[in-house]
Image: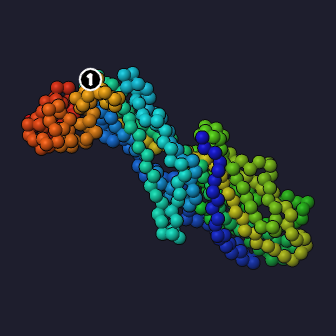
């Protein structure tokens, strides 16, 4: 289960220059990445496997963001699980990958982000002779994350706003790397006309990561939602107008939250203004999917990859030959009557071929010329 325990990113505020008169053009969201946990590789090996041969499934992840990714895990789906004799796949640990926490790069220490690998053994279903079936395999990768955005807004007293005739602009928002991006869409400066007038600040939230945020312990609980927080200096107070810090993303893509500005520390008739740094923080769980495939070729024979104690080397020959990855020296020693002294011996290698040809020629490409 993933729970919302996150580490915060501290950002240096990016200054916003507001001129005393005229309108300033600004950009939103400068040079930030939508990446947090990155899939470096997801593949089955070998890509084509015989039904009495084992395969492996490897998932490699890297934290390409700026904050720690917590409780990182993945689960396999879109694959028929079950007993091989019932045309199902047996996957080690039921296809659950556990990575724990993934740390990002540390540029100050000259450390790049590490790659984290997890491998699971897969036993394919039993197929009939000459059957050739491709199987899609999908992984749902889940993690907890938090990223931030920083900006500044300017608040002017009613008197100063009228006297200067200042034009409006949009604040520049700097997001940290992560799939959720925030943007302040309120025009600045904000004309402060006293506590009897409602002054609001609108924050737009966008999902840029190609996956789905959620707030529950499971990926299907409270999906398309993030928890948003806005902090400012002591000059003002910001509270969500609906009293809820949760933002729902419509269609999983975009949502917004409106905050009421209060406790401004000057009178509307004063000739004054203030610039207020803001930090917007989004906390959430996130999942995305990765896909690969593996093809199974049927031999019409019973599998021979029993690892139980007491099985003879001859009974388990095919699996151990595959496990040796074609190492003839190692495989020759599996034949009764031969030992390590026969490594490289042509007669011993012929014996290997005869043993394999008697059950499953598919395993012995080296034997075709013998």
Q: Nearer the viewer, residue 158 or 343?
A: 343
- Count neighbours of disc 1 (C-alpha within 10 A) and say few if under 14, some if 14 to 19, many if 20 or more: some
Q: Is residue 22 left or right of residue 135?
A: right
Q: Is residue 110 left or right of residue 336?
A: right
Q: Nearer the viewer, residue 89 or 27?
A: 89
Say above or below: 236 vs 285.
below
Residue under circle 1? 301
Q: Residue at x 78, y 53 (%)?
A: 240
Q: Residue 75 at x, y = what percent?
A: 50, 39
Q: Quadrant of the C terminus?
A: top left
The answer to whether residue 336 shows anywhere in this view is: yes
Q: Residue at x 79, y 69 (%)?
A: 155
Q: Quadrant of residue 172?
A: bottom right
The answer to whether residue 133 shows anywhere in this view is: no
Q: Secondary structure at mark 1?
A: loop
Q: Nearer the viewer, residue 112 or 296?
A: 112
Q: Residue at x 17, y 42 (%)?
A: 340
Q: Residue 293 at x, y = what percent?
A: 38, 38
Q: Is residue 308 left or right of residue 367?
A: right
Q: Nearer the viewer, residue 229 or 52?
A: 52
């Amino acid at each position: 289960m993933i729970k919302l325990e996150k580490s915060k990113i501290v950002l240096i505020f990016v200054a916003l220059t507001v001129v005393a008169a005229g309108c300033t053009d600004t950009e939103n969201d400068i040079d930030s990445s939508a990446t947090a946990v990155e899939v470096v590789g997801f593949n089955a090996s070998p890509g084509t496997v015989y039904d009495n041969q084992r395969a492996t499934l490897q998932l490699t992840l890297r934290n390409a963001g700026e904050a720690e990714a917590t409780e990182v895990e993945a689960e396999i789906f879109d694959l028929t699980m079950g007993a091989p004799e019932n045309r199902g796949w047996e996957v080690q640990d039921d296809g659950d990958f556990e990575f724990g926490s993934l740390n990002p790069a540390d540029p100050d220490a000259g450390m790049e982000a590490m790659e984290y690998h997890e491998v699971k053994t897969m036993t394919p279903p039993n197929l009939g002779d000459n059957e050739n079936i491709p199987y899609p395999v999908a992984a749902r990768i889940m993690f907890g994350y938090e990223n931030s955005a920083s900006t500044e807004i300017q608040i002017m007293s009613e008197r100063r706003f009228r006297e200067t005739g200042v034009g409006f602009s949009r604040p520049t928002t700097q997001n940290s790397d992560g799939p959720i991006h925030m943007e302040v869409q309120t025009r600045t400066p904000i004309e402060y006309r006293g506590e009897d007038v409602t002054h609001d600040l609108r924050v737009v939230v966008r999902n840029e990561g190609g996956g789905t945020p959620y707030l529950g312990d499971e990926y299907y609980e409270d999906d398309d939602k993030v928890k948003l927080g806005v902090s400012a200096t002591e000059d003002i107070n910001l509270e969500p107008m609906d009293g809820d810090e949760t933002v729902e993303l419509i269609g999983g893509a975009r949502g917004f939250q409106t905050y009421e500005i209060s406790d401004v520390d000057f009178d509307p008739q004063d000739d004054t203004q203030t610039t207020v740094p803001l930090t917007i923080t989004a906390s959430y769980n996130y999942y995305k999917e990765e896909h690969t495939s593996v093809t199974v070729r049927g031999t019409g024979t019973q599998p021979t990859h029993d690892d139980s104690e007491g099985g003879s080397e001859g009974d388990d020959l095919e699996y151990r030959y595959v496990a040796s990855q074609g190492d003839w020296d190692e495989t020759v020693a599996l034949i009764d009557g031969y030992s390590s002294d026969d490594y490289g011996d042509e007669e011993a290698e012929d014996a290997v071929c005869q043993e394999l040809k008697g059950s499953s020629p598919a395993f012995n490409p080296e034997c075709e010329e013998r």
